Image (cartoon, rainbow, N blue to C red):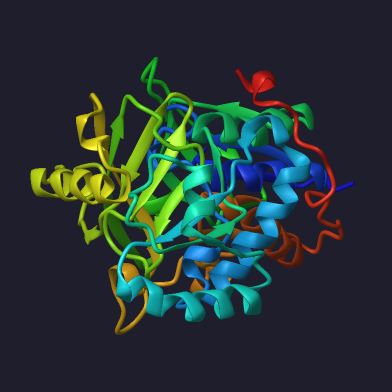
């Protein structure tokens, strides 16, 4: 077992999964978060366990990553997931024309996809638009983002990881392997030493990297989501079309999360919610599921996706894949960053980052997260 130490910055799903993986490999891990667990982007996502079908046509690498972790997580954390499947529904001729392209792409990515007649789909989901032409069933699911992240946190803690919430990183001395933090509850500042520093701060990755005078590019793509106090469907409902704004309805307990939109923001801590985005989301959802507009509005929220910056692409065109960065290339030995990805792929992101850290530090320890059952989120409360 390794006696190495690691500090992971950011307790969203990515940081929690990295802390979990490293703790299983014998690292003494400290996970630090300036607010609470899953308080950033993770806690403001659409709560969907992706099958990868949404990305199969235009982003097949991400699609394969999603279905791989989807199938693994079904075995490892069943109490945190609602395995209710999803429907991609066709409501017009454009959707019908997309059907064969979609089915072929799902097959290439290894995503189970079953075409249903309109009658079959309406038997499963009676509230769908009765003008439905076709539907395709895929293994989507739903999770509570907080519970999901807590499962990784609880299991990491059981393997010795230390979890420090409301602890903000305010300085990095990468050469000395030191992280300066401030306890937001007491105002006290102090340093912590380690062998590896992993920057998993989501859209705040550039801000953290800048503390070490390192430039990391992230495309902060904001998205609005609307929660209504009604559950008109039990399956995740998508339009049978290339990913676009306002084309998903996700059931979550007795509520539904409608979304989402996409636009670039400068500051992930300052995301005003455009009223026209809210209206477009509700209007589109009402087309998919007539009458949902009448459901009581519970909340509107927005968060920034930390997308990998790609030359010539932006917004919906940008991959939902991820990138692990070893900053030894920036003369910052022992400092790493991770950008991009989905909450669904947090486990594999943790695996790839832990592999990179182990390689750099000369630690020989295999990943165990594909087979090791996760503790219930209840142990992380």
List the single residue furthest toward the right. 1
Residue 189, image quadrant: top left
Residue 178: give x, y in percent of width and height.
55, 45
Which sits in the foreground, 10 or 286? 286
Residue 61: give x, y in percent of width and height.
57, 74
Q: Indicate whether 313 appears above or below 141.
A: below
> Is residue 374 at all visible to an observer of this figure?
yes
Relative to residue 362, is residue 208 drawn left or right?
A: left
Which sits in the foreground, 375 or 350? 375
Residue at 36 percent across and 20 percent down: it is 187
> Is residue 208 at all visible to an observer of this figure?
no
Q: Indicate whether 299 appears above or below 243.
A: above
Residue 210: give x, y in percent of width and height.
35, 57
Which sits in the foreground, 373 or 71? 71
Residue 309: give x, y in percent of width and height.
37, 72
Relative to residue 299, is residue 114 drawn left or right?
A: right
Q: Indicate whether 243 appears above or below 166.
A: below
Relative to residue 240, is residue 222 drawn left or right?
A: left
Residue at 55 percent across and 69 percent down: it is 62
| Total count of labels | 0
Task: Tell me the quarter of the image containing the C terminus.
Answer: top right
Residue at 42 percent across and 59 percent down: it is 89
Relative to residue 246, is residue 124 drawn left or right?
A: right
List the single residue furthest toward the bottom. 312
Residue at 59 percent across and 41 percent down: it is 84
Residue 375, image quadrant: top right
Which sits in the foreground, 56 or 11? 56
């Amino acid at each position: 077992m390794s006696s190495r130490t690691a500090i992971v910055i950011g307790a969203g799903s990515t940081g929690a999964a990295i802390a979990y993986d490293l703790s299983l490999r014998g690292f003494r891990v400290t996970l630090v978060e300036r607010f609470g667990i899953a308080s950033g982007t993770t806690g403001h996502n659409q709560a969907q366990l992706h099958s990868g079908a949404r990305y199969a046509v235009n982003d097949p690498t991400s699609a394969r990553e999603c279905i791989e972790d989807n199938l693994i997580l079904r075995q490892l954390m069943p109490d945190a997931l609602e395995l209710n499947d999803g429907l991609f529904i066709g409501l017009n001729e454009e959707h019908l024309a997309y059907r064969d392209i979609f089915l072929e792409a799902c097959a290439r990515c290894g995503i189970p996809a079953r075409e249903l007649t309109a009658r079959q789909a309406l038997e499963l989901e009676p509230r769908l638009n009765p003008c439905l032409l076709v539907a395709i069933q895929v293994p989507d699911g739903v999770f509570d983002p907080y519970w999901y992240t807590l499962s990784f946190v609880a299991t990491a803690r059981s393997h010795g990881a230390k979890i420090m919430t409301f602890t903000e990183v305010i300085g990095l001395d990468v050469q000395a392997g030191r992280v300066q933090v401030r306890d937001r509850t007491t105002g006290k500042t102090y340093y912590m030493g380690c062998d590896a520093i992993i920057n998993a701060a989501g859209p705040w990755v550039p801000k953290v990297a800048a503390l070490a005078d390192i430039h990391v590019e992230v495309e902060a793509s904001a998205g609005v989501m609307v929660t209504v106090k009604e559950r008109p469907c039990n399956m995740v409902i998508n339009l049978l079309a290339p990913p676009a704004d306002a084309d998903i309805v996700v059931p979550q307990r007795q509520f539904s999360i409608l979304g989402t939109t996409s636009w670039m923001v400068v500051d992930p801590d300052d995301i005003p919610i455009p009223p026209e985005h809210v209206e477009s989301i509700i209007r589109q959802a009402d087309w998919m599921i007539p009458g949902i507009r009448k459901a009581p509005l519970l909340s509107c929220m927005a968060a920034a996706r930390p997308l990998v910056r790609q030359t010539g692409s932006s917004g919906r065109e940008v991959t939902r894949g991820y990138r692990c960065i070893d900053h030894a290339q920036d003369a910052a030995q022992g400092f790493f960053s991770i950008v991009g990805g989905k909450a669904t792929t947090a486990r594999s992101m943790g695996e790839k980052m832990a592999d990179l850290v182990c390689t750099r530090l000369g630690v020989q320890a295999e990943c165990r997260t594909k087979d090791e059952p996760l503790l219930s989120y209840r142990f992380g409360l």
